[in-house]
Amino acid sequence: MDIDTSQIRNLSFDLGKAEATTFPKVRAIVQKTMLDTKNELKAEAAGSGIAEAAALASAISYETKETGGGVSAEVGPVEGGPGSFAFLYYGNRNNGPVLKDPLFAMQRNAKKAEPYFLKVLGDVL
């Protein structure tokens, strides 16, 4: 009995090519989403009228990393220095939060990026 696996081999080859062209597009969308989120967080902190929040704005950054065929990202204040004012987002034992939770900015920007991700995935399929 002969089994024709040529279509499976062709699909495997096509998916390999798709990964090579898709990954840079996905990485670019993630980086743009992080940049937009960083800029929103900086603007919210700088415009709050709170001196510590203005200092915190200077410590807000983002970083993307390639992870085993994918990409991950973090956005927020870097540790130490003005980044220690991150308690302004969540409060501490003496005060409640005075800045909006950064998750809201991330959710807004992830929602804006969704159509771009779908387009890239649609191009693959």
Image (cartoon, rainbow, N blue to C red):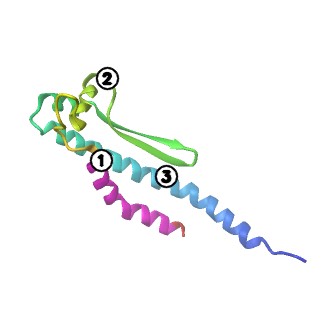
Q: Which residue is mark 2?
A: 80
Mark 3 or mark 1, earlier in chain: 3
83 left or right, relative to 22: left
Q: Residues within 10 Å of mark 2 (few under 14, many from 20)?
A: few
Marks 2 and 3, how far apart at CA = 32 Å
20 left or right, relative to 39: right
Q: Residues within 10 Å of mark 3 (few under 14, many from 20)?
A: few
Mark 3 secondary-structure assignment: helix
Image vertical order of residue 14 relative to residue 106, above or below: below
Residue drawn 34% across the image and 55% down it: 110
Marks 3 and 1, how far apart at CA = 25 Å
Image vertical order of residue 22 relative to residue 74, above or below: below
* Three-letter code for the amino acid on which mark 1 is drawn: Leu
Disc assigned to residue 24: 3
Image x and y of residue 35, in percent: 32, 45
Mark 1 secondary-structure assignment: helix
Q: In front: 116, or 85?
A: 85
Image x and y of residue 112, in percent: 31, 59
Question: Viewer-nearest of labels 2 and 1?
Answer: 1
Disc assigned to residue 51: none
Image vertical order of residue 45 relative to residue 79, above or below: below
Q: In front: 84, or 121?
A: 84
